[in-house]
């Protein structure tokens, strides 16, 4: 086995390991609360619903 094929094999193993780590981070128990909170954001009451417009744009731009 030459070095090129060995490097390609190691790169494939590294990519697969990275994929597994990302999956564990996304579907782990610690991230469940964060995703549930993010899913409820459209339903939360904000300043627009109460009739009060914010003084500044949410992205920091001047109005």
Image (cartoon, helix red, strand yellow):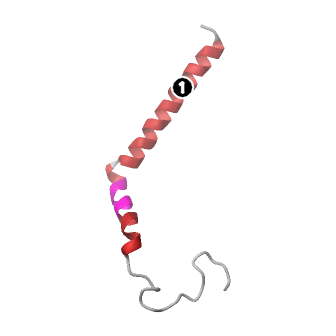
Q: Position of residue 61 (x, y in %)?
A: 66, 79
Q: Residue furthest right?
A: 62
Q: Is residue 50 above or below residue 45?
A: below
Graded by Cα atoms within 10 Å as few (under 14), some (14 to 19) or many (20 or more), the crowding at tag 1 reads few
What residue is shown at x 61% (from left), y 15% (from top)?
5
Q: Nearer the viewer, residue 54 or 28?
A: 54
Furthest toward the top, the residue is: 1
Residue 13 sits above or below residue 37 on the image: above
**Could you tell whether 5 is left or right of 14 in the image?**
right
Count of marks, rendered view: 1
At x 40%, y 70%, the residue is 41
Per the image, the residue denoted by label 1 is 12
Magenta-colored span? 31-36
Residue 57 in the figure: left or right of residue 33? right
Q: Which residue lies most toward the left here? A: 29
Q: Main secondary structure of the magenta part?
A: helix
Reply above or below: 16 against 54: above
Q: Left of 51 or right of it: where is 43? A: left
Quarter of image, res 54: bottom right
Compare residues 9 and 30 and report the one nearer the observer.
Answer: 9
Task: State the SS at label 1.
Answer: helix
- Please state, as top left, top right, bottom left or bottom right, where the N terminus lies in the image: top right
Residue visible at 65% across and 16% down in the picture? 4
x then y, percent, for residue 58: 57, 78
The quarter of the image holding the C terminus is: bottom right
In the rendered image, residue 49, in percent from the top left (x then y), is placed at: 42, 86
């Amino acid at each position: 086995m030459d070095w090129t094929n060995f490097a390609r094999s190691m790169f494939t193993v590294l990519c697969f390991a990275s994929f597994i780590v990302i999956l564990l981070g996304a579907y782990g128990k610690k991230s469940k609360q964060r995703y549930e909170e993010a899913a409820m954001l459209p339903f939360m009451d904000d300043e627009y619903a109460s009739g009060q417009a914010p003084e500044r744009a949410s992205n920091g731009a001047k109005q």
